[in-house]
């Protein structure tokens, strides 16, 4: 094997579309419209079309997208926002910055997504919103979440940083892309996401015209028009260069997602009968775009397995090593070990194997054969 196995291969991906990307970047330089240039609007329009969302508001990153969403929904200090404990930090961090109270809930052991059965128990008179995080590429079970939210008059925010392009099916057969079923959705274009730019980027989507208007204003210093500040906002922009790159990459997203799905099937087959490894399950209600292919290591110490893979030149990652309720930054919320047993167990067992648009079958075979040897 000439090329070493990588967790992601952004350079290999770039080489396959080099002329188009290079031209897009050159065009931005030639235009000198580095901020709010035409590609920003064009990309937002294309993404709206792709998601079947009425409005897309580009912004600086996925964390600020969440902050803008909270602000646009009018959440106020002390308001409770429910979110999964097994999660990236962004939704909790953005909430805490606004003095909202993150309220954690456990996840489902099969899908790693928010456990709908646990959700209603944590709803109080102060609950104003639920952040549904579509983890690793698969939509959470939106239909019961939406009806629960409706029943309790709670807003639904979808953090879709990991599942752009995943399709959710309602009981009646209606299908929607992840991210556009709740009141407001957010995403990140961090380079390693399924749709990543060459720096930081993010977006907010909604079908609600008022929320779109307010989000756009908040992301632009709270300006109604230039130098007229209607509210306190922030400076959260997707720059033109990133938008130009994303426009090129969005055209390939479905093809890339299909490639990831095929690679996941290969892993499933190769790992299917390996004792001590649990492959990721697919829900009946959502497609899975495999932002990550995350197995559970049940037969041996996950950390030891990871170290031995590394020694053999095979990268792997742990998403996430500790649940949010046990992080020092959120100690003030008063949670204890044992509060969310599934999230805690997953943090001990999960291991993400390399999955990306350039991954070769031979590489997967090599990864799995090493893994088998270690786990035996
Ligand atoms: C990556 C990610 C974010 C944050 O995105 P940034 O662009 O890095 O701010 C938020 N939520 C989830 C679930 C993510 O995976």
Image (cartoon, rainbow, N blue to C red):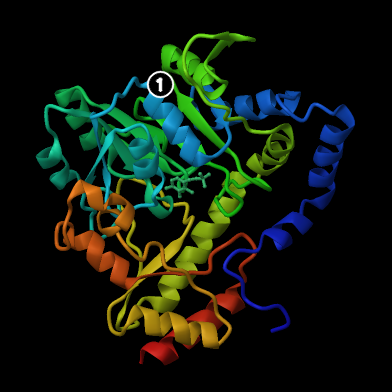
Q: Quadrant of residue 243?
A: top right
Residue identifier under label 1: 72
Question: At 47% across and 44% down in the image, what residue appears?
Answer: 161
| Residue 112 at least partly seen | no
Element assignment for label 1: helix
Question: At 48% across and 33% down in the image, what residue appears?
Answer: 65
| Residue 41 at least partly seen | yes
Residue 187 placement, left or right of 43: left
Q: Is residue 256 above or below residue 295?
A: above
Question: At 42% across and 35% down in the image, what residue appears?
Answer: 179
Location of residue 257 in the rendering, given as x and y in whole percent from the top left corner? 54, 51
**Quadrant occupied by the C terminus:** bottom left
Q: Is residue 229 above or below residue 180?
A: above
Residue extending furthest front?
A: 332
Q: Quadrant of residue 229?
A: top right
Location of residue 217 in the rendering, given as x and y in whole percent from the top left corner? 52, 16
Between residue 168 and residue 105, name the one nearer to us.
105
Question: At 62% across and 76% down in the image, what residue appears?
Answer: 5
Q: Is residue 23 above or below residue 289?
A: above
Residue extending furthest right?
A: 30
Location of residue 222 in the rendering, given as x and y in whole percent from the top left corner? 52, 16
Between residue 202 and residue 134, name the one nearer to us.
202
Total numbered labels: 1
Establish whether ligand 1 lies closer than 8 Å to the Cβ of label 1: no
Between residue 130 and residue 137, name the one nearer to us.
130
């Amino acid at each position: 094997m000439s090329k070493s196995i990588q967790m992601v291969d952004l350079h290999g991906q770039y080489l396959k579309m080099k002329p188009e990307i290079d031209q897009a970047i050159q065009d931005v330089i030639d235009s000198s419209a580095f901020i709010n240039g035409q590609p920003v609007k064009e990309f937002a329009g294309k993404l709206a079309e792709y998601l079947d969302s009425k409005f897309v508001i580009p912004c600086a990153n996925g964390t600020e997208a969440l902050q803008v969403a909270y602000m646009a929904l009018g959440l106020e200090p002390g308001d409770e926002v429910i979110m999964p404990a097994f999660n990236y930090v962004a939704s909790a961090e953005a909430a805490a910055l606004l003095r909202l109270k993150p309220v954690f809930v456990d996840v489902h052991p099969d899908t790693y997504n928010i456990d709908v059965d646990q959700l209603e128990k944590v709803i109080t008179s102060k609950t104003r919103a639920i952040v549904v995080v579509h983890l690793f590429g698969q939509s959470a079970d939106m239909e019961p979440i939406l009806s629960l939210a409706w029943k309790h008059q709670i807003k639904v925010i979808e953090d879709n940083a990991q599942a752009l392009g995943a399709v959710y099916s309602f009981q009646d057969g209606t299908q929607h892309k992840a991210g556009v079923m709740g009141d407001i959705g957010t995403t990140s274009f961090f380079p390693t996401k399924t749709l990543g730019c060459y720096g930081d980027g993010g977006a907010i989507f909604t079908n609600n015209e008022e929320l779109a208007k307010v989000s756009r204003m908040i992301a632009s210093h709270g300006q109604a028009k230039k130098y007229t500040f209607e509210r306190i906002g922030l400076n959260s922009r997707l720059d033109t260069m990133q938008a130009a790159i994303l426009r090129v990459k969005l055209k390939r997203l479905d093809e890339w997602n299909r490639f990831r799905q095929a690679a996941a099937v290969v892993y499933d087959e190769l790992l299917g009968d390996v004792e001590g490894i649990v492959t990721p399950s697919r829900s009946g209600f959502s497609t899975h775009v495999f932002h990550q292919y995350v197995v559970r290591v049940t037969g041996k110490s996950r950390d030891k397995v990871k170290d031995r893979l590394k020694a053999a030149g095979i990268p792997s990652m742990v998403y996430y090593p500790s649940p949010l309720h046990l992080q020092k930054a959120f100690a003030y919320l008063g949670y204890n070990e044992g509060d969310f047993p599934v999230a805690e167990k997953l943090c001990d067992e999960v291991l993400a194997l390399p999955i990306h648009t350039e991954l070769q079958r031979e590489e997967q075979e090599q990864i799995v054969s090493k893994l088998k040897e270690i786990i035996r």
